[in-house]
């Protein structure tokens, strides 16, 4: 429900911000919309079978995580010129991270082996936003609103996102995967990483538009 409400909020608030910010808010709303629909699917499966199929989570992630990641490109693009390479590196990094994760969970690859390239891709994204071209562009801005949002978003991508590899790690390396616990943890993580992430962008957009 919070994802549905956030979707309505981002789409309505789009009217309130300057034109250059509208794409960022649209993308925030798409992320929460896509996740809300997947949660409806997942709830139905849970009610019917008492299990939660990994495939729905990964379809959700495959759509929402690249969209979240390109928000870095979009918020920087709202205020300055950003080379397309930043967009592509963030996009490809997320797809590699999730592709290996899924290969491990689906049994296409040894789950422990798949963990390594998936983690490497996540570290690559983190490097890009902390040290790479995106971070250099951000450091060179004269816009405190974008810089503040950027900083909080980097925190969510490191601390907030660490929940998912930890869930994988406990499941496949420690052999403890309590599906109820894992669902609760993922749900709380999604609240921060999708809704709060969007709110951070919304706050920068409003402050910068007024
Ligand atoms: C809204 C959903 C989000 C932000 C999901 C993010 C998911 C990840 C950051 C997953 C990362 C993984 C690794 C870094 C290694 C193990 C496999 C994954 C896919 C769980």
Image (cartoon, rainbow, N blue to C red):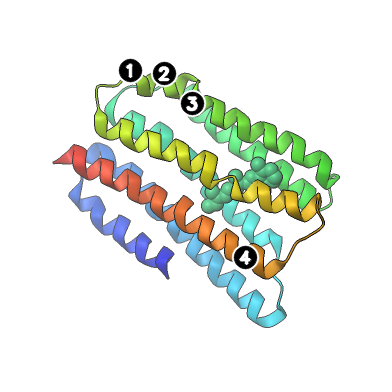
Instruction: Please tell me which of labels 4 and 2 falls first in the chain.
Output: 2
| Rendered location of residue 133, percent (x, y) | 47, 19
In this view of the protein, which residue sits in the foreground, 53 or 113?
113
Q: Nearer the viewer, residue 11 or 1?
A: 1
Q: Which residue is mark 3?
A: 130
Label 3 residue SS: helix
Q: Is residue 32 above or below residue 65?
A: below
Q: CA distance from mark 1 to mark 4?
A: 40 Å
- Counting residues from the start of the chain, the first of labels 4 and 3 encountered is 3
As displayed, is residue 56 above or below residue 26?
A: below
Residue that badge 2 annotates? 136
Residue shown at 41% from the left, 18% from the top: 136
Residue 131 in picture, x, y percent from top left = 50, 21
Q: Which mark is residue 140?
A: 1
Q: Give the position of the C terminus as an image quadrant.
A: top left
Cα–Cα gap, marks 4 and 3: 30 Å
Q: Under 8 Å from ligand 1: the CB of mark 4?
A: no
Q: Quadrant of residue 135?
A: top left
**Disc 2 to disc 1, C-alpha distance:** 6 Å
């Amino acid at each position: 429900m919070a994802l549905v409400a956030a979707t309505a909020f981002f789409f309505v608030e789009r009217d309130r911000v300057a034109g250059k910010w509208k794409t960022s808010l649209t993308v925030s709303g798409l992320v929460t919309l896509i996740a809300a629909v997947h949660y409806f699917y997942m709830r139905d499966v849970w009610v019917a079978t008492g299990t939660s199929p990994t495939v729905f989570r990964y379809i959700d992630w495959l759509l929402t995580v690249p969209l979240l990641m390109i928000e870095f490109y979009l918020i920087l693009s709202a205020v300055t010129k950003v080379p397309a390479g930043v967009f592509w590196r963030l996009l490809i990094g997320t797809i590699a991270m999730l592709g290996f994760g899924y290969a491990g969970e689906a049994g296409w690859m040894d789950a422990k082996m798949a963990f390594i390239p998936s983690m490497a891709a996540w570290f690559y994204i983190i490097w890009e936003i902390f040290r790479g071209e995106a971070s250099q562009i951000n450091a060179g801005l004269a816009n405190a609103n974008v810089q503040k949002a950027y900083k909080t978003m980097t925190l969510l991508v490191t601390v907030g996102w660490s929940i998912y590899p930890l869930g994988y790690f406990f499941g496949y390396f420690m052999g403890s995967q309590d599906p109820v616990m894992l669902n609760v943890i993922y749900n709380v993580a999604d609240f921060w990483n999708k809704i709060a992430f969007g709110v951070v962008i919304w706050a920068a957009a409003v402050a910068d538009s007024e």
